[in-house]
Amino acid sequence: MTIQDNEWLQEQQRVDDTVRKVKDKKKSLVSQVKTVKEEADEIKQNFWEDVTVNLDEPDDVIETFTSIKQQAELLSERERSYRHVEENISILNKLEYSPYFARVDFKEQGEEKENIYIGIASFLDGDDYLVYDWRAPISSIYYDGSPGPVSYETPEGPRQGEMLLKRQFIIKDGQIESLFDTGVTIGDEMLQEVLGNRADTHMKNIVATIQKEQNKIIRDIKSRLLFVQGAAGSGKTSAALQRIAYLLYRFRDSLHSDQIILFSPNRLFNQYISKVLPELGENNMEQTTFLEFAQSRIPDLTVESLFEQFETSLNAADNHYRTKAIRLKNDLSFVHAITDYVDNLATSGLFFKDISFRGKILISKEEISNLFYSYDRSYSLPNRFPLIQKELLTRLKEIAREEEKKQWVEEEMELLDREDYLKAFQHSQKGEDDFNSFDQEKEFLAKQIVNNYFKKIRAGIKRNRFFHRKAQYVDFLKKVPELLTLKNYDIHANDWAEIQRSTIKSLNGKNIQMEDTVPYMYLYDLIVGRKSETSMKYVFIDEIQDYTPAQLAYMKFMFPYSKFTMLGDINQSIFNNGSDSPIQTSMKIFGEEKAEIIRLTKSYRSTAAITAFTKAILPDGEAIELFEREGELPSIVIEGTFEDLMDQIARQVERLALQSSSIAIIGKTMQDCEQAYHQLKDKIDISLIGLKNQELAEGPIILPSYLAKGLEFDSVIVLNASDDKYNDESERTLLYTICTRAMHHLIITSLYQPSHLFDRVPKKLYK
Ligand SMILES: Nc1ncnc2c1ncn2[C@@H]1O[C@H](COP(=O)(O)OP(=O)(O)OP(=O)(O)O)[C@@H](O)[C@H]1O
């Protein structure tokens, strides 16, 4: 549909009018913010002058305390309102630049026609909505409907009417750059414009062009489990982030951004998505990775990352055992075996550690065990821990008193410096009786010395360090053959012995393998008591296909009251072990009631040429739909020597740099990337991204496959996709994941024969 010049003019006038009002509003807020800030500064400056400090009598202390509290509250109220006004100004700045991106004309039965303009936030002139927030109930007709009869949900129930017009704008700096009237889908023209742009180092919001299926994900408020299976580049992560913004808006009185947590694949990804919510005027949710989460719960061991597991299980000689161990330990039945094992610990079988000091046992593990099992059976294991802590602390106090009289304390006293003596002297002066003897000073010092040493022991007791977590886990492993039929996992007695040996070796080296983390945490939680995260209302898990059944079960255990949103793509698994699909697993664990599965099939990231190529890598890629966007054919380049391969890559980087903002060379493992990096760094300007250096750098980067997860680049060069690099069928999904990171250009390089996993790709789809 063409838009008449005069209509364009009218729309520009409305934009001008809105922008003018936005500016006026901003002006008044800026002067307001100045006043509030000055007030806050003044309170800060005069804080101590305005409170009455008098500590003479108990009543005076209370009065002083109240006065300080009042003053602090006043300050924090001013600071809050300052922040609030600042946030509003920041939204107005965005509206001033681009007040809205869409207009729908809506006529409800028996009412006047309304022109609804939609932008990233609402803006009112008196009672008049000049701009509606994209999350307002009425805005959903823009995403879901096309001209004709439409309806939308409101908290009061559904509303019906007719949409008479659906129009889209691209407005920059207050000027309409493009204007389209659209039909069924949210304008291909607008999407074309948006997607044709170069990639940024950070993800952008998609509120102007959210598609109908994505909108379902964003606005779902009923499901306890929302599962999104979507092709690479279909907007899963984008939908998840806009969903968070939606939830924060919809439940703004009861939901806070720190009650939402997103589990992402790695830290690089966290950075990549960090700007989306602030751009929409919302605070970021909590973000973590499974590794960080596990590490915080196993502080005394170094937790192996999924990627280290990937690298070692690829390179290690004990690959064979490791693969079997991984399969078993990731399975739900292994988690159940732990529950059975713990059920048998009610009357005996718990492992404790001696509480020792200076090489001497203060309280032996036998004593602790006797004490522990002296409680009535009706006390659950976790309930006994606080009781035993209390008892141990009391005993420790008695022991400390004994200890104070010992020779070593005297000896330590000799080594004290003048200041310590001075303190002791001052203390003895303060004593209630006037008897200021040398003995009193000594007593005080002895107490101090012992206390200093015992602080650590006390802290340990409070953290249940007397429970021997490692020994318990090792004991559990020993009992596994009684709890499970290992043969069903193709594990025989000697395999199991080998697996145990390797686990113990890791633990002794203060490390824990990824596949042991969930069992290790779960065992501890069942015995000592879980510290579940009951305040989290929403848990989002991205790249769900890389989570094991055991991990998912543990998530449910840890977040018992949360609603889950899971996003994944079965075709992008790191380990393709061919068991249940993530959907089946999640349904098994979370139940099908109040669960919703949404499938996204259209891929928006890549040009049609790249999507056609990448979907052909998959045996069942037919379901993936292309978004028609022009671009050059992917190419496969073969070289005969490593040096030539590096020269080729350097040349390609130079060529692509002319047309791309972001270029990534993606290798299979870190080792591959390091090797290439050492050659390339002398030829081109390039940064190596690894587990230890997870910072998004400007300019060309080289990174291993698993760190590229969830990211996208204008141009992707696949580092040596030769047949011996990617030989196993299970690596098909990895190759697919790498190739689908490309938006506009995809170059596959190979030393000799390219991987046979490309064999099914028709020749016409690449150069
Ligand atoms: N409705 C949309 N409008 C504009 N851009 C979109 C839309 N949906 C997705 N995109 C763009 O497509 C690209 C891929 O989106 P996103 O990263 O969210 O996909 P994904 O499904 O999480 O991908 P992957 O699984 O491959 O990591 C991004 O550049 C995103 O901005």
Image (cartoon, grey):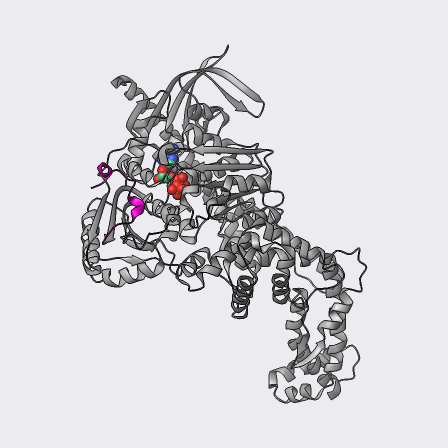
Residue 10 magenta-highlighted: no
Q: Main secondary structure of the magenta part?
A: loop
Q: Residue furthest top?
A: 110
Is 762 or 31 nearer to us in this picture?
762
In the picture, the quarter occupied by the N terminus is top left
Give the quadrant of ligand 1: top left
Task: Give above or below for 586 relative to 500.
Answer: above
Residue 152 placement (x, y as % from top left) = 50, 22
Judged left or right of residue 8, residue 158 is right
Residue 238 placement (x, y as % from top left) = 42, 39
Task: Give above or below for 208 relative to 489.
Answer: above
Start-end of magenta stretch: 752-767
Judged left or right of residue 650, residue 111 is right
In the picture, the quarter occupied by the C terminus is top left
User: Would you identify the image quadrant in which residue 416 lies?
Assistant: bottom right
Residue at 68% x, 67% y is 351
Q: How many marks?
A: 0
Residue 456 placement (x, y as % from top left) = 63, 72
